[in-house]
Image: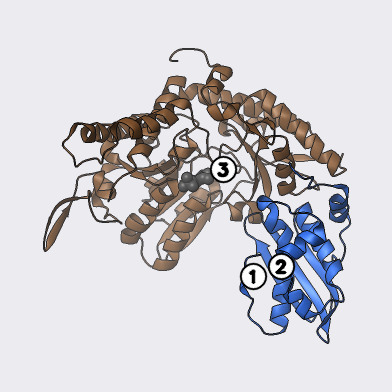
Chain colours: A brown, B blue
């Protein structure tokens, strides 16, 4: 597929689920921020692993064990290159992004945050990059501060960031792209400022790594978390990137087999990175699938993925803003450069649950609720719940049209203009 | 969709809910939230001689939850605490006239759960296991 022009129909042909129906209607899948669909190549790679070379890694010296070990390591090397890490020693496989963030808050945070220290988080974090820091603050007697949003309720306020950094926090936790507002934060400049104030930086990349080119060395963040299942890969595996020196200084949370170099009856020493953080048998099939997902994204090209999503987001914003009584949240058309393919919206007079239920009847999958970002939705946007559509590389403008038609149906049922 | 969750009467109850509003001098009140979707409800009951004389609810929710709270509050007026204690998920289906399916079950049952918790609280009794599953 390399060097070919982007063709959404050709992409769609690679995803078997897009040929299925939901409630008797062709599936229109617009909940990609929750999880992405999987191409044949990922499904086949996993199935092929189990069918032809399933074996435990790092242990057997027989052929298929070696093949499985190589496949697992290859997957890490693919991810290392995908996000431009220095080496695969900086890539720790976890269960998901949440697990990766918890590894940092519990291990690094547990050792480096103390009473009276400050922890700085943004006001647009997913619970995954918020609750672990709240828990750490409570446990340690540390203070949790928030970077406020600008007046537009879409971007982080630079002024607030600068003010909060004067408290010299130990760590700044910020999302690369918001799963509610769709805002892409300038994590590079946030990192530069945070480092200037002596803070470490953890970037939640759950919504960015799937949709745009990520360069962790350029961002210069200390930690970066992601989930394979949101980027065409399988559920059950994710990754933590961390700078090698930091990982070296961190203690593992989970101990046992595989993460140890040597054990005697009264001593032990940790294994090399990244294995020191991967106790017990790993999700090899998951890693193989993750690697296949990265191959797929590379073949399409992340620039093309981003460009396609920007175009469809622009089209959707235009259609939704033309629809009476629909209100969209986050950046508008003018802020498209800094918005990923996520649009949260409300329909006046109708609860988001009812909107998504009626859309379900039309074969359209969208999300309704607080999107694991309760403080943002209820305390800042002042909504009890929101509807959300989120795109990926296989979505088409005709699917946006179906959403608008279905919203018209909702309005008819609820007798709204 | 096997059944139309948005039949005319559901929309009617949503637009013009019954028994929605405040109540002064309630004998007992109870608040609940559905963390999943952000719905919230407060039930207030006036109880005399173990009979529900009046009931009001307040809150914010989807059409299913508002309609079911409307119909439920109509239904329980004049009922005894014992009758309320015996109500369960099937009672809700009977009152609203359909089974909303697993995805929307909580929307339909949150009002009964809250009402039953209020009834137990009034009697200083622990909430029973069946109510906790609502
Ligand atoms: C911004 C953001 N961070 C973290 C997560 C958590 O991802 P996971 O559930 O795969 O750990 C999500 C997923 O919804 C997300 O959108």
Identify the residue under disc 2.
Answer: B88
Give the CA distance from mark 1 to mark 3: 36 Å
Secondary element under disc 3, as helix, strand or loop, is: loop
| N-term mark: 1 or 2 | 2
Q: Which quadrant would residue A169 be assigned to in this image?
A: bottom left
User: Disc 1 beta carbon < 8 A from ligand 1?
Assistant: no
SS class, disc 2 = loop
Q: B92 or B40, which is in the foreground?
A: B92
Q: Is residue A251 above or below residue A311?
A: below
Question: Residue, x 67% and y 27% (percent of image)?
Answer: A399
B47 on left or right of A37? right
User: Are the numbered discs 1 and 2 placed on the same chain, yes or no?
Assistant: yes
Residue A122 x %, y %: 52, 50
Looking at the image, which residue is at 36% across and 58% down? Answer: A106
> What chain letter is assigned to the residue under label 3?
A
Q: Is mark 3 within 8 Å of ligand 1?
A: yes
Q: Position of residue A294 (x, y in %)?
A: 40, 29
Q: Find the residue positioned furthest to the bottom.
A: B49
Q: Which mark is residue A179?
A: 3
**Number of the label disc, if any, that sits on residue B41:** none
Q: Are marks 1 and 2 in contact (CB under 8 Å)?
A: yes
Label ID, residue B130? 1
Looking at the image, can residue A234 be seen?
yes
SS class, disc 1: helix
Q: Please identify the quadrant where the C terminus of chain A is shown.
A: top right
> Pointer 1: residues within 10 angstroms few (<14), some, or many (20+)?
few
Cα–Cα gap, marks 3 and 2 = 37 Å
């Amino acid at each position: 597929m390399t060097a070919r022009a982007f063709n959404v129909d050709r992409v769609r042909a690679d995803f078997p689920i897009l040929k299925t129906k939901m409630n008797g209607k062709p599936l229109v899948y617009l909940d990609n921020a929750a999880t992405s669909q999987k191409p044949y190549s990922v499904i086949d790679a996993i199935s092929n692993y189990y069918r032809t070379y399933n074996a435990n890694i790092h242990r057997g010296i027989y052929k298929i064990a070696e093949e499985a070990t190589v496949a697992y390591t290859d997957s890490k090397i693919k991810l290392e290159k995908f996000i431009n890490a220095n080496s695969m020693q900086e890539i720790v496989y976890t269960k998901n992004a949440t697990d990766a963030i918890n590894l940092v808050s519990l291990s690094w945070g547990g050792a480096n945050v103390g009473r009276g220290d400050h922890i700085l988080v943004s006001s647009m974090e997913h619970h995954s990059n918020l609750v672990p820091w709240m828990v750490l603050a409570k446990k340690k007697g540390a203070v949790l501060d928030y970077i406020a949003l600008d007046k537009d309720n879409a971007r982080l306020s630079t002024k607030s960031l600068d003010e909060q950094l004067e408290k010299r926090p130990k760590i700044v936790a910020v999302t690369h792209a918001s799963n509610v507002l769709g805002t892409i934060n300038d994590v590079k400049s946030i990192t530069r400022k945070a480092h200037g104030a002596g803070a470490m930086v953890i970037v939640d990349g759950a919504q960015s790594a799937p949709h745009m080119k990520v360069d962790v060395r350029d961002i210069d963040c200390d930690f970066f978390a992601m989930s394979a299942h949101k980027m065409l890969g399988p559920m059950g595996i994710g990754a933590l990137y961390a700078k090698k020196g930091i990982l070296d200084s961190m203690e593992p949370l989970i101990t046992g087999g595989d993460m140890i170099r040597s054990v005697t009856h009264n001593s032990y020493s940790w294994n090399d990175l990244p294995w020191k953080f991967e106790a017990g048998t790993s999700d090899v099939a998951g890693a193989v699938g993750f690697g296949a997902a990265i191959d797929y994204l590379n073949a399409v090209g992340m620039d093309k993925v981003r460009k396609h999503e920007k175009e469809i987001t622009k089209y959707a914003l235009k259609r939704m803003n033309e629809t009476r009584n629909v209100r969209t949240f986050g950046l508008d058309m003018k802020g498209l450069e800094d918005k990923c393919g996520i649009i949260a919206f409300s329909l006046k007079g109708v609860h988001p649950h009812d909107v998504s239920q009626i859309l379900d009847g039309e074969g359209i999958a969208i999300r309704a609720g607080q999107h694991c970002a309760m403080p943002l939705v209820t305390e800042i946007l002042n909504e009890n719940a929101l509807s959300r559509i989120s795109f990926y590389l296989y979505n088409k403008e005709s699917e946006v049209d179906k959403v608008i038609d279905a919203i018209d149906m909702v309005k008819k049922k609820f007798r709204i203009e | 969709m096997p059944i139309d969750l948005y039949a005319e009467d559901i929309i009617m109850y949503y637009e013009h809910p019954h028994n929605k509003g405040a109540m002064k001098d309630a004998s007992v009140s109870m608040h609940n939230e559905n963390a999943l979707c952000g719905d919230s409800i407060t039930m207030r009951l006036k109880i005399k001689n173990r009979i529900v004389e009046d009931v009001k609810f307040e809150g914010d929710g989807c059409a299913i939850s508002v309609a079911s709270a409307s119909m439920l509050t109509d239904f329980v007026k004049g009922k005894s605490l014992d009758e309320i204690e015996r109500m369960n998920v099937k009672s809700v289906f009977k009152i609203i006239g359909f089974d909303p399916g697993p995805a929307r079950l909580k929307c339909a049952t949150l009002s009964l759960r809250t009402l039953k918790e209020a009834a137990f609280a009034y009697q200083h009794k622990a909430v029973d296991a069946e109510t906790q599953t609502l």
